[in-house]
Amino acid sequence: MKSKLKLTKWRNIISAAVGMAMAANINIASAANVNSTGLAITKDTVKVGILHSLTGTMAISETGAQEAEKLAIKQINEMGGILGRKIEVIQEDGASDWPTFAEKSRKLLVQDKVAAVFGCWTSASRKAALPVFEKENGLLYYPTFYEGLEQSHNVIYTGQEATQQILAGLDWVKKEKKAKTFYLIGSDYIWPRTSMKIARKHIENVLGGKVVGEEYKPLGNTQFGSTINKIRLKKPDVIYAAVVGGSNVAWFKQLKAAGITGKKQTLLTISVTEDEVLGIGGQNLVGFYSVMKYFQSQDNSNNNKFVKEFKKMWGSDSVIGDVTQAAYLGPWLWKAAVEKAGSFDVDKVVKASETAGIELKTAPEGYVKLHPNHHLWSKTRVAQWGKDGQAKVVFESGLIEPNPFPKGYQ
Amino acid sequence: MGEYTTQELISIFAMQGFAGISLFSVLLLMALGLAIIFGQMGVINMAHGEFMAVGAYTTYLISAMSEKYFPGFVQYYFIFAIVLSFLIAGLLGYLAELALIRHLYKRPLDTLLATWGLSLIMQQTFRSIFGAREVSPTLPEWLLGSYQPTETIDIPLNGLFVLGLTIVVTIGVFYLMFRSSWGLRVRATTQNRVMSGAVGINTKKIDRLTFALGCGIAGVAGAAFTTIASTGPTTGSLYIVDTFMVVVFGGAGSLMGTIASAFSIAQGQSILEFFISGSMAKVITLLAIVIFLMMRPEGLFSIKVRK
């Protein structure tokens, strides 16, 4: 009896040990499957990076983006994470300084070995970080609408490229306002200049209209008196504006003070979202139009839920602009691609993003779908600003194919 | 130009003239406080822009509070905000002099570094208190829109307001500096510190009040600029270059020089902007100033001071 008991005990112990070894084997196997490149992934967590400016001039714009990314990650974790793993965030500050973006990207990829990075806002910061992502084979989700002319293996662009934002808006203003003459004005750097180049080609070659003035102001410029007088002299049907940052506020305040208001003048801008309106003041914008892919006022069940959750997490005073929404899409698109690929490996995730027809039916803007060229199919919307700082959507295009290298527009 | 009527051309000409004058009043208001501190005390105050931001944030706070608690007051708060901006920025300037600047009078290059450090501290404080986003006060109705003397001329009301304020402040500064006994003591201290001390002038107190006055005027400028642009933590650094440009071009220590310099830079810039693009206008203006200063390093006007 006694010896038998001993034997059973031994057998139990051995079978338990074998069982454990087998279980461990399975674990090792599955970890190797989802992560064959040494990313910071354990059996129940995965690390990602958030890289935006928390200090410096760009903090104004980038705050909303990183808030939205954190909201998406929190929601994904509450649903059980990705491939059974909770997402852990490592946040770095780009400090509105482009070399810092490159340096922090390297830190996130080499030292922290994050599986994906959600970040950058300006094109300059993206261009600085891009070589690092390409060399270390990282994955960046970039949220801002931008000038196009780029498509990297290592970047997914969740904002609009220039043609998506520009062409539909110009078509609308030509049809709706019978516009023939345009005055183009922007801040003096790559995004407004590229955008205006595309706009000019479209106005002259496709719409048969005329550009009566094109002008760029230094970043941070706050004096628009002379420009406004020039506009008065040229009497354009449409003012087409891409002024950014603090200048933007001065530009609209001075237009209003000069008696150029939404009642008398059609103005279409591609650089004003709900975020900017906080600074500009709704009273200075009444009646003017913005062209974006998302507006906070959009009334659909996805967006109502998103706005509610965002305000719950970040305060009832917070507003949500176009880029904030695009940033929110990043973690969700990554989740969809990782699940399609069954792996966190960057190459596999990129391949799934390119070929698996990743789509989001739950996007606040409505519906988006990833194009093999790493950009999103999305709709363009024109909305008119009201005194309360919210815009009413007056036009919505169909789903527009992203075309980062538009022929005939360069 | 055949497609325009004479009246339209005259209107544009008038409005363009006002755009220049408006820019002049902005530059002058920015530079006055700095000219006093730099000219009278020889301190290069890199935090001047941040004292302007103090004024702007004060205005924003009062606007937000009056909107919330005294809606009837919204039409009038602005005047009150300007006075309070002057007092708060002045008080902060007074404290900065007491804690920091007075230890560095003999080391002008160190004041440059110290005030720059002060500006960084102030920027981060704004960011912590008000957040990184830019803010704007709600302006009273009488500051919005334009005055129309004829059908085709629109003169911006906020521009007129800043112009009026600049005139008042400039006259005030002139009165204080050249007609009051306090101004006499300030000028005496500038000209000969040791002798002024010997005849019983409390030069330390004079320094402190001069610095506070300069900062207070910066606060007024900041309050006035909320009608033109927005306020963010780094707003001050946008203005500091233009401000120094006006003071250096005008000649340190000369208030007349500051006025003449603000006028010529403003008119030059605004006329150039009308005919060529904004960026090029700025380049040409800066080039002209550099060439002028190479030929005449002391600026437009200069006062002979015994060192």
Image (cartoon, coloured by chain):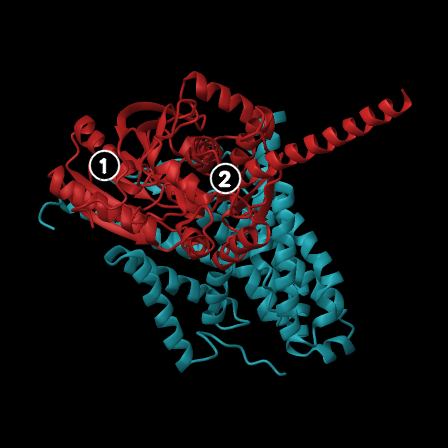
A135 lies left or right of A203? right
Assess disc 2: are there few (<14), some (14-19) or many (≥20) residues with their C-alpha within 10 Å of its C-alpha.
many
Q: At x 34% / y 65%, what residue is drawn?
A: B283
Residue A191 location (% of width, % of height)? 33, 49
Q: At x 28% / y 46%, what residue is drawn?
A: A195
Closer to viewer: mark 2 or mark 1: 2
Q: Which residue is mark 1?
A: A167
Residue that lies at the very extreme toward the right in this rendered image: A2
Q: Label 2 is found on which chain of the structure? A: A
Q: Kindly identify which numbered label has been placed on residue A250.
A: none
Real-space Cα distance between discs 2 and 1? 37 Å
Residue A81 location (% of width, % of height)? 57, 29
In the rendered structure, which amino acid carries the disc numbered 1? Leu
Say which colour chain A has.
red
Residue A7 location (% of width, % of height)? 82, 27
**Quarter that holds the N terminus of chain A:** top right
Assess disc 1: are there few (<14), some (14-19) or many (≥20) residues with their C-alpha within 10 Å of its C-alpha.
some
A407 lies left or right of B237? left
Residue that lies at the very extreme toward the left in this rendered image: B2
Tell me where residue B66 sits by quadrant: top right
Q: Kindly identify which numbered label has been placed on residue A344.
A: 2
Question: Quick check: can you spot residue B128?
Answer: yes
Q: Respond whether the residues carrying marks 2 and 1 are from the same subunit.
A: yes
In the rendered structure, which amino acid carries the disc numbered 2? Phe
Q: At x 63% / y 83%, what residue is drawn?
A: B307
* Observer-nearest of B249 and B197: B249
Instruction: Give the mark nearer the N terminus: 2 vs 1.
Output: 1
Say which colour chain B has.
cyan
